[in-house]
Image (tube, helix red, strand yellow):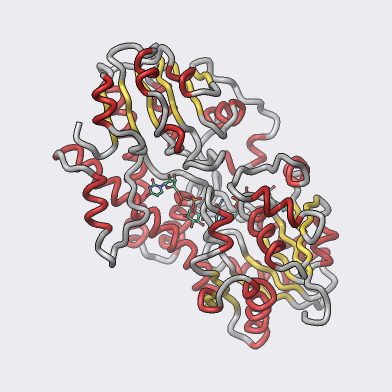
Amino acid sequence: FSQKMVKICCIGAGYVGGPTMAVIALKCPAIEVVVVDISKPRIDAWNSDQLPIYEPGLDEVVKECRGRNLFFSTDVEKHVAEADIIFVSVNTPTKTRGLGAGKAADLTYWESAARMIADVSKSDKIVVEKSTVPVKTAEAIEKILTHNSKGINYQILSNPEFLAEGTAIKDLFKPDRVLIGGRETPEGKKAVQALKEEVYAHWVPEDRIITTNLWSAELSKLAANAFLAQRISSVNAISALCEATGANVSEVAYAVGKDTRIGPKFLNASVGFGGSCFQKDILNLVYICECNGLPEVANYWKQVIKINDYQKSRFVNRVVSSMFNTVSGKKIAILGFAFKKDTGDTRETPAIDVCHGLLGDKAQISIYDPQVTEDQIQRDLSMGKFDWDHPRHLQPTSPTAFKQVSVVWDAYEATKGAHGLCILTEWDEFKTLDYQRIFDNMQKPAFVFDGRNVVDPEKLREIGFIVYSIGKPL
Ligand code: NAD
Ligand code: UGA
């Protein structure tokens, strides 16, 4: 590419496409980056002052590059046709129907992107899988492209993204590693080098850029998410035993994590993991194992999800059983609805399952989250499992608002007159609330169920609360 300006087009302006491309544009001023999407509201938002996703540090990066070498557009075909490198970061949800429903990845969006690339391309392209896809997807994409190629050369690379929401910009600036997989042919190796040198080497140290074959790169992404989720299910499984024995999960996790072979990170017991990817990617891994005749391996990973579901229902059971076995007609405050702090994202948030559980027992719930709107919450609570990532299911149906649910913009409002309060997201502001004031305005006995180990149970007990914290002595 060295003679001319490299042009990048990214298909999919979501949580991954938006931030990753903004950072590439920032770090590579000589590259023109256009992010395209079929959703006009999303592109409009990227072009406005109110970006479609909340992510610390993102505004500054977008402000610096937008209009310089970073552009957002709905003119998908034009920008795909002009690009040298095409990143595809469309959503890859769990299938809800047909073969593999409830497990396999739905590659509808991916396939339609690939067919469109084949339709409009007039010059050679490097097509980069940025989305998380089943291992061997590159083979399918390659077939679609080469069987429709009109003599154009395509190289498919796998370059999975490891950023976490809430820290996306930090993760992109200083990634633990960048992984690039490609074909082991001379053309494949050239394409890997091009992505490495033209793009990532501008800010990522050489020893952090790993190159592998295509299948290793695709599988490493699924494996990394499975390992991460497995740590959480492991500590959550131990949290149940802590509650039964008087051990304290924070002390256990600290002692275990001090072993340098285990390491201290990602060992916080919780009400369960959420987010758009852990469950989806593990289900996908399970399905691939089953398809490859490896039921034992499939069952091993399935257990990570089972423990996560168990942890969520255990939490609901604890709430209901502590409150004299019924929450019917009682007001329960929910503090935090996002799947983790510093994001407004609610995809697969454990709060959805907890709220469903409490609503099933006829509670009145009052929800406060600093970043999530009432609309979003009502939509989340009225949607079926896995439907959230399938826009076609969501089309005209405006959500049937739950009468038992109110959404308020303040923790004190949410807890006023409540019998119990549940902390479901670890927002920093929940650590410093005036719990005396909250206690004074609640029904007695006043219960606190801390699903994130945010509060100091002893201090709250001094105020007069009955406190239940995950994995802590009662
Ligand atoms: P997202 O739903 O936020 O964004 C996907 C976007 O693609 C949507 O805006 C959608 O309108 C658009 N799209 C779908 N089909 C299209 C088409 N044919 N043409 C143009 N645009 C199209 O999803 P996301 O969270 O950004 O995730 C994308 C992928 O990245 C997934 O495979 C996910 O597993 C993976 N991933 C996500 C994260 C994360 O933190 N969210 C991290 C790493 C990897
Ligand atoms: C996760 C991975 O961390 C990223 O590396 C990956 O790129 C991404 O999935 C993806 O593929 O989508 P993300 O889901 O954004 O990132 O956020 P995490 O920080 O991993 O948290 C996931 C869930 O686990 C959250 O609900 C969080 O609260 C929970 N969690 C995390 C715990 O309960 N305990 C912990 O110790 C850590």
Residue 67: quadrant of the picture: bottom right
**Closer to the camera, 432 or 309?**
432
**Residue at position x 57%, y 74% in the image:** 181
Q: Residue furthest bottom?
A: 186
Q: Give the left or right position of residue 418, taking residue 8 as reference.
A: left
Up the image or down, 82 lies above or below 2; here it is above
Q: Position of residue 136 (x, y in %)?
A: 55, 69
Up the image or down, 350 lies above or below 116; here it is above
- Of the 4 image quadrants, the one containing the N terminus is bottom right
**Closer to the camera, 162 or 466?**
466
Q: Position of residue 83 (x, y in %)?
A: 79, 67
Q: Give the left or right position of residue 24, taking residue 384 as reference.
A: right
Q: Residue furthest left?
A: 245
Q: Give the left or right position of residue 184, taking residue 437 as reference.
A: right
**Closer to the camera, 404 or 335?**
335
Q: Give the left or right position of residue 275, taking residue 255 as reference.
A: right
Up the image or down, 268 lies above or below 271; here it is below
Q: Position of residue 435 (x, y in %)?
A: 37, 23
**Residue at position x 71%, y 39% in the image:** 50
Residue 200: quadrant of the picture: bottom right
- Of the 4 image quadrants, the one containing the C terminus is top left
**Residue at position x 76%, y 62% in the image:** 33
How many marks on residues?
0
**Residue at position x 48%, y 41% in the image:** 341
